[in-house]
């Protein structure tokens, strides 16, 4: 599936290391996480998956996960193994500014980017401190709430993209709730450097469990259409 | 940015960035509104006039004779609603109201915290919605009915193990989506900072009263205090005023099926990690996936524990021991028959540990057990399980 997303033209690929209690995720991602954990997914198999992909493609890849799988592996070991496998960045959904320092240090020691989150509820002061510490790109949470297909453009997110663009040269990439051409066009016109689509793609997979051929076709078509909408 | 969020290395605020503004606002309210005279006066009214504080510290003649030391029970079972949970629910609901929030959400396992929150919401005129796992809804029909009668909306949780852990996940998801007008009224000393401190401060009334009462009755401090620990709010509330004293402190965890079996003994058998916003001991696998806990008592059936307990254990200030399901049932019946007081199954864990500790105490030594709740809610469950022994 990673290969399919890559061929369809994604600029960056985000792979989720599942956690049993994903509080930032809506039902589609929760079910996918449950499927992956039941199938035996763990940090070791994640790294070997990334290694296999890296052997055949140079497309940047970031890991999205939660704090505990990283903490249990050990911060140093997790980021080192991620870097060795060929990942370019790591984003940890439940690590805000207050807790980010040891995670950022481990990422930089391993030579990969600490991807940090910002949200429309992030104050200007916090935003500055987050930008100071972030690497790669800023992950802008594009909706109040959890991951999941929404379809509408959030005016607060547009405003937030402009706010960040005014003070930082880091690429800004909104994610959460994005699935339609309309959203992709609106956010990229506002200045976003890309968009992150998760649940919408994972839903195509979830709807076709046990039919891998159909899965690949559906995911490929969706990614190609979204890529074409970025201006 | 919030600072000083830790108990030693434990605690912190591991939540999505979107929630940080709400936690900052809550921390600000906690620091500025709660200590003020207006809030304290309101709180005083609700705790004393409304909820029935202070609760008695009962000298138990029969228990003392039977166990060979001077045994007292702190009677949180006599508080309105039947458990200590109301201390925190009233405090947080009042704070949320002062902060201009219109809606309160809560999680509940057995339903005690849900009922306490529904009561606080009704008393203060606020909308209450309670997340509860589908499994727990089926097991706790009585409390579900109580919450609905009190005007709260009970929202079934169908994700994960469909129990308390998943109800907390769902409440956190709701809060992220509705941070502007909603307060998440968490039920124990768990979750991200400032919750473990906030809930502790609202529960410390238990220990403050106990300390004054025992000094008045005995003229000295107790030798040992026992409380049960799930998330650990009744225990922290009881222990806090005694932390600087020589009194020995004991926490009873859910040993469940006993050695090798399923359990809820997070501190005795777990390992530190991050769950529900805090770094604390957890029941988890080698890769950091959270495992399902088990206890006969729904209030102790949680794979995490308050971060301050992790700190107090590592520091050696509090001793935590396991009490099995069978031992808890035995002590449920023991207290009912010896003293005429039916304890909650959670509190029966504390009674069981107290019976063990009493063996090392002399006849003039003072032992206090925090009786965190009454057992009406558990009567049908125990009757079914202990059928032959009744």
Image: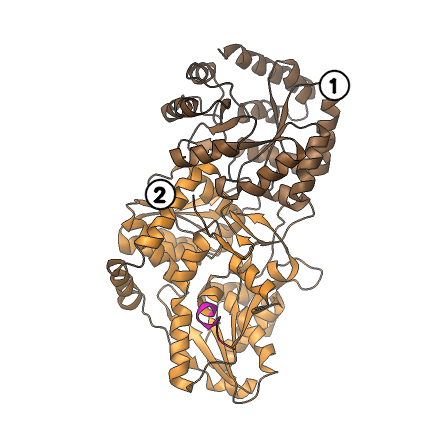
Chain colours: A brown, B orange
Q: Mark 2 points at which residue?
A: B182
Question: Residue B252, relative to residue B14: is it above or below?
Answer: below
In the rendered structure, the answer to whether residue A60 lies left or right of residue B279 reads right
Q: Do the residues labelled 2 and 1 touch (CB within 8 Å)?
A: no
In the rendered structure, the answer to whether residue B47 lies left or right of residue B261 reads left
In the image, what residue occupies the spot 59% across and 13% down? A221
Q: Name the residue under label 1.
A: A56
Provide residue B243's location: percent of width, then percent of height: 49, 70
Which residues, given as a range, are shown in magenta?
B239-245
Do marks 2 and 1 share a chain?
A: no
In the rendered structure, the answer to whether residue A29 lies left or right of residue B185 reads right
In the image, what residue occupies the spot 44% across and 15% down? A182
* Nearer to the camera, A134 or A116: A134
Provide residue B100's location: percent of width, then percent of height: 28, 45
Image depth: mark 2 or mark 1 in front: 1
Secondary element at tag 1:
loop
Residue A214 in sight from this viewpoint: no
Mark 1, Cα crowd under 10 Å, few <14 / some 14-19 / many 20+, is: few
Provide residue B87's location: percent of width, then percent of height: 37, 62
Chain for disc number 1: A
């Amino acid at each position: 599936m990673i290969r399919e997303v890559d061929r369809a033209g994604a600029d960056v690929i985000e792979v989720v290391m599942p956690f049993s209690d994903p509080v930032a995720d809506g039902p589609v991602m929760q079910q996918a996480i449950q499927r992956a954990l039941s199938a035996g997914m763990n940090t070791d198999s994640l790294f070997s998956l990334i290694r296999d992909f890296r052997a055949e493609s140079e497309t940047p890849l970031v890991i999205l996960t939660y704090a505990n799988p990283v903490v249990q592996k050990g911060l140093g070991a997790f980021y080192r193994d991620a870097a060795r496998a060929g990942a370019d960045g790591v984003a940890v959904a439940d690590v805000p500014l207050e807790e980010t320092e040891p995670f950022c240090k481990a990422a930089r020691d391993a030579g990969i980017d600490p991807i940090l989150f910002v949200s429309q509820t992030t104050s200007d002061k916090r935003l500055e401190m987050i930008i100071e510490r972030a690497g790669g790109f800023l992950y802008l949470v594009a909706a109040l709430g959890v991951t999941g297909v929404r379809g509408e453009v959030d005016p607060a997110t547009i405003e937030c993209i402009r706010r960040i663009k005014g003070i930082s040269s880091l690429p800004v990439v909104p994610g959460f709730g994005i699935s339609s051409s309309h959203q992709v066009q609106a956010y990229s016109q506002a200045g976003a450097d890309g968009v992150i689509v998760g649940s919408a793609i994972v839903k195509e997979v979830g709807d076709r469990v046990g039919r891998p051929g159909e899965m690949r076709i559906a995911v490929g078509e969706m990614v190609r259409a979204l890529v074409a909408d970025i201006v | 940015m919030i600072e000083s969020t830790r108990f030693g290395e434990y605690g912190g605020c591991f939540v999505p960035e979107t929630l940080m503004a709400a936690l900052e606002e809550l921390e600000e309210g906690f620091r500025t509104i709660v200590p003020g005279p207006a809030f304290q006066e309101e709180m005083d009214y609700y705790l004393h006039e409304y909820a029935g504080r202070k609760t008695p510290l009962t000298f138990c003649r029969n228990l003392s004779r039977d166990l060979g030391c001077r045994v007292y029970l702190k009677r949180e079972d006599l508080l309105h609603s039947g458990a200590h949970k109301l201390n925190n629910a009233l405090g947080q609901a009042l704070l949320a109201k002062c902060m201009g929030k219109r809606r309160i959400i809560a999680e509940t396992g057995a339903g005690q915290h849900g009922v306490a929150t529904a009561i606080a919401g009704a008393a203060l005129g606020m909308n209450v919605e309670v997340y509860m796992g589908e499994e727990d809804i089926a097991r706790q029909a009585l409390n579900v009915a109580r919450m609905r009668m009190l005007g709260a909306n009970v929202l079934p949780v169908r994700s994960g193990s469909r129990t308390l852990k998943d109800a907390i996940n769902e409440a956190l998801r709701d809060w992220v989506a509705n941070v502007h007008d909603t307060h998440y009224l968490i039920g124990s000393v768990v979750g991200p900072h400032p919750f473990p401190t906030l809930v502790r401060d609202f529960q410390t009334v238990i220990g403050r009263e106990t300390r004054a009462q025992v000094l008045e009755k005995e003229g000295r401090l107790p030798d040992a205090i026992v409380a049960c620990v799930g998330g650990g709010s009744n225990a922290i509330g009881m222990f806090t005023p005694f932390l600087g004293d020589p009194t020995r402190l004991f926490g009873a965890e859910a040993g469940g099926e006993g050695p090798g079996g399923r359990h809820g003994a997070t501190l005795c058998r777990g390992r530190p990690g991050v769950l529900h916003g805090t770094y604390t001991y957890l029941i988890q696998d080698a890769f950091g996936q959270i495992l399902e806990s088990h206890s006969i008592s729904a209030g102790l059936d949680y794979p995490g524990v308050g971060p301050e307990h992790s700190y107090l254990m590592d520091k050696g200030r509090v001793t935590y021991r396991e009490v099995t399901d069978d031992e808890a049932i035995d002590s449920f019946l023991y207290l009912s028959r010896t003293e005429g007081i039916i304890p909650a199954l959670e509190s029966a864990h504390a009674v069981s540990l107290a019976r063990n500790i009493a063996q090392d105490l002399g006849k003039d030594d003072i032992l206090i057990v925090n009786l965190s709740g009454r057992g009406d809610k558990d009567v049908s469950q125990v009757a079914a399980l202990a059928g032959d022994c009744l």
